[in-house]
Amino acid sequence: MPQKPLKIAQVIASKGWGGREKVPLLFAREYLRLGHQVSLWTNPETPLGQETLAEGFPLFPYRFRSYLNPAAFFEIARALREDKPDILHVHHSRDLWFLVPMLRLKGWKGPLLLSKHVESGVSKKDPIHRFLYARVDQVLGCSTMIRENVIKTCPVDPAKVAVGYAPVDPDRFKYSEKARRSLRRAWGQEKNIVIGMVARLTPGKGQELLLKTAAILRAKHPRLRFRVAGQSSPDEKDYAEGLLRLRKQLGLEDIFEYEGYRSDVPGFLSALDLAVHAAPAESFGLAIVEAMACERAVVARRGGGVSDILENPTAKKFGGFLIDSDDPEEWARKLAPLVRSPRLLQKIGKANRKESLRFSLKALSRLNMDYYEKLLKARPR
């Protein structure tokens, strides 16, 4: 850990509000608790920007408009001049296009660390990317899969690429009996088994698979109910409407509810009996860790970064956590024995809480701090 307080800038211009955008703010809170100065270089009009301002962190406006828009260069220059950071921690590789040229122009020589949260499907070993990645001192992939993808697709020394998981805050994500009782009463589900999912309503998250699985399970398990929390982005309304049509076609309107956006995700998770994560190729799967931290049993689709979470001794001890199929019949077969045993679900949930602490905010912040200290020694500002 660094011996003196650092000025750390978290940089991301993305307009989204998924794990990639939430991670910088999570780290910012912990760094502040540890006595460091933290700023975010981000778009003030985005959800991340609004949260940053609401929590009182310094925000330096930085917007991605297009690769050809020069305004971003001036915003980076202003942030460098006014913020004077010791460390730059970038969370979207796209931002290197503006950041790296301006760092060279301004002569800023401090450490630059890149967290990769999403897999790249194209090779980035052309001259332009070689120029950009040559300035990156350390890359942290959010899972083993992403680390391997970076080495395969990006022009970077494998020795500079490590795994740096997305963190969960166990002080926020924890089981609440009060929230469970309140929500179960509101839902009218005090005596039923509730299976749920937290995911944005977007193609690839697996909501259709859960709907089809529910249609199979309801015949033999009439006490099952299903709830999905999450909303679609403005350009994905058609997809969300398609999910509603599929629910009607399957005759599930009485047992399958869409919650929309929920700010009390830990409370929602506490009210579930079993959490499902059906996305086929997640870079990591932060929603899985959050459910585990809330003492929920989790069944997930095998693949991507999910293996880093659930391919471990605790998960293997209980079995049935990972399903290597998109066949709803297979999912129904694997879920059936779990929903028949509430005590088993509780036992799994207790074990999952302990496992989730491998990805705690404190542990992963310490990991980042160790990298910051190492990089500062190797590349003093």
Image: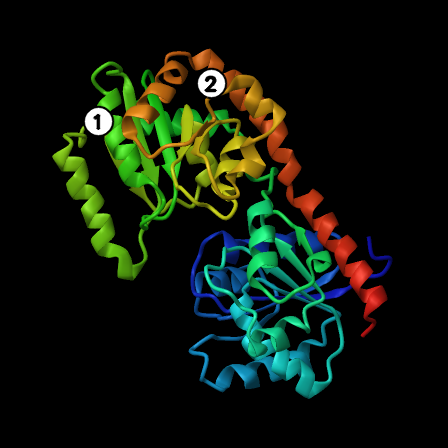
Disc 2/disc 1 C-alpha distance (Å): 22 Å
Quadrant in which the C terminus appears: bottom right
Q: Is residue 192 above or below residue 60?
A: above
In the image, 221 versus 35, the foreground residue is 221
In the image, 376 versus 171, the foreground residue is 376
Residue displayed at 29% across by 36% down: 209
Left or right side of 217 for 57: right
Badge count: 2
Q: Is residue 34 above or below residue 85?
A: above
Disc 2 marks which residue? 345
Left or right side of 150 for 68: left
Dot 2 amino acid type: Leu
Can residue 35 be seen? Answer: no
In the image, 124 versus 313, the foreground residue is 124
Residue 7 found in image quarter: bottom right
The x and y percentages for residue 27 are 64, 54
Left or right side of 287 for 230: left
Residue displayed at 58% across by 78% down: 127
Left or right side of 148 for 330: left
Disc 1 marks which residue? 215
Mark nearest the camera among 2 and 1 is 1
